[in-house]
Image (cartoon, grey):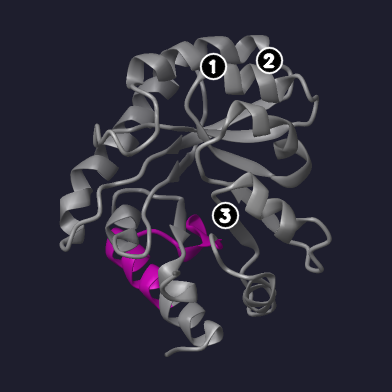
């Protein structure tokens, strides 16, 4: 079993190779360590080894880790958001990747903290996954101009798990094309594409990912 330091090195090498294939600088891609069911000590070790961004799926679990965390890092909310937990987000997170309905935008805006948000799309149409349809995305983007604390940063999606990462390529390409299309339609300059996980992030990078959410490849299998 690799140490966290070794795992980080291997993942960064994989990112570098994918960037080289796609003709992009490695600095274009932000590595987010997904820390669902990872204890604070291992997260702190990852931070000491150079990971500066971490993603959490559940508010309750995140609160226990983030409050009083000893290193200066950025926290990303990447999981589904329950409306009754919304009040905790401004105090915990720097980015929110999982905005999928207008009530979340309006709810976050009322707290007055500038928040960078990404809109989650369910491009795979899987019932087990959260995320908006494109029409709902456009409805949210129409609302953006009326909000004072929300910075629209980009789009996020999750591909279905498969043995062959190439199966995810069409979805990643679709997300990139959707970002380009809505930027033109709404006069926006969103740049972030949060897509790709441990099993498929190289393909995501080749299709334009600017943020990859990696858990298992860094921390091992979670029980």
CA distance for labels 2 and 3: 25 Å
Q: For residue 109, what is the image quadrant?
A: top right
Q: Position of residue 30 (x, y in %)?
A: 52, 58
Mark 1 or mark 2: which is in front? 1
Mark 2 or mark 3: which is in front? 3
Residue picked out by circle 3? 55
Q: Residues within 10 Å of mark 1 (few under 14, many from 20)?
A: some
Q: Earlier in the sequence, mark 2 or mark 3?
A: 3
Let me know if residue 33 is in the magenta part: yes
User: Which quarter of the rendering shows the N terminus?
Assistant: bottom left
Please provide the residue range marked out in magenta: 13-35
Q: Nearer the viewer, residue 205 or 120?
A: 120
Asked if residue 111 lies left or right of residue 143, the reply is: right
Find numbered disc 2 in the image and state the secondary structure of the residue it sits on.
loop
Does 16 sit above or below residue 172? below
Asked if residue 105 lies left or right of residue 178, the reply is: right
Asked if residue 98 lies left or right of residue 10, the reply is: right
Count how many numbered circles sit on residues in the image. Answer: 3
Q: Position of residue 187 (x, y in %)?
A: 49, 17
Q: Position of residue 79 (x, y in %)?
A: 51, 44
Q: Earlier in the sequence, mark 1 or mark 3?
A: 3
Q: Position of residue 82 (x, y in %)?
A: 57, 31
Does 133 sit above or below residue 116? above
Find numbered disc 3 in the image and state the secondary structure of the residue it sits on.
strand
Q: Residues within 10 Å of mark 2 (few under 14, many from 20)?
A: some
Residue picked out by circle 2? 147
Q: Which mark is residue 102?
A: 1
Find numbered disc 1 in the image and state the secondary structure of the residue it sits on.
helix
Residue drawn 79% across the image and 25% down it: 111
Residue drawn 33% across the image and 28% down it: 178
Residue drawn 61% across the image and 21% down it: 105
């Amino acid at each position: 079993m690799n140490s966290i330091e070794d795992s980080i090195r291997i993942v960064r090498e994989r990112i570098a190779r994918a960037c080289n294939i796609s003709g992009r600088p490695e600095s274009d891609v932000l590595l987010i360590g997904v820390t669902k069911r990872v204890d604070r000590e291992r997260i702190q070790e990852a931070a000491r080894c150079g990971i500066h961004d971490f993603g959490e799926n559940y508010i309750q679990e995140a609160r226990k880790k983030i409050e009083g965390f000893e290193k200066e890092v950025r926290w990303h909310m990447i999981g589904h958001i329950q409306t009754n937990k919304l009040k905790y987000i401004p105090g915990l997170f720097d980015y929110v990747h999982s905005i999928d309905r207008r009530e979340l935008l309006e709810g976050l805006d009322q707290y007055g903290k500038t928040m960078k948000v990404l809109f989650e799309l369910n491009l795979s149409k899987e019932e087990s996954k959260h995320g908006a349809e494109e029409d709902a995305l456009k409805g949210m983007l129409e609302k953006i101009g009326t909000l004072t604390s929300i910075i629209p940063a980009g789009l996020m999606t999750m591909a279905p798990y498969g043995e062959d990462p190439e199966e995810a390529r069409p979805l990643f390409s679709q997300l990139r094309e959707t970002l380009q299309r809505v930027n033109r339609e709404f006069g926006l300059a969103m740049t972030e594409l949060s897509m790709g996980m441990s099993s498929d992030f190289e393909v995501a990078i080749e299709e334009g990912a600017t943020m990859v959410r990696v858990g298992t490849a860094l921390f091992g299998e979670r029980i």
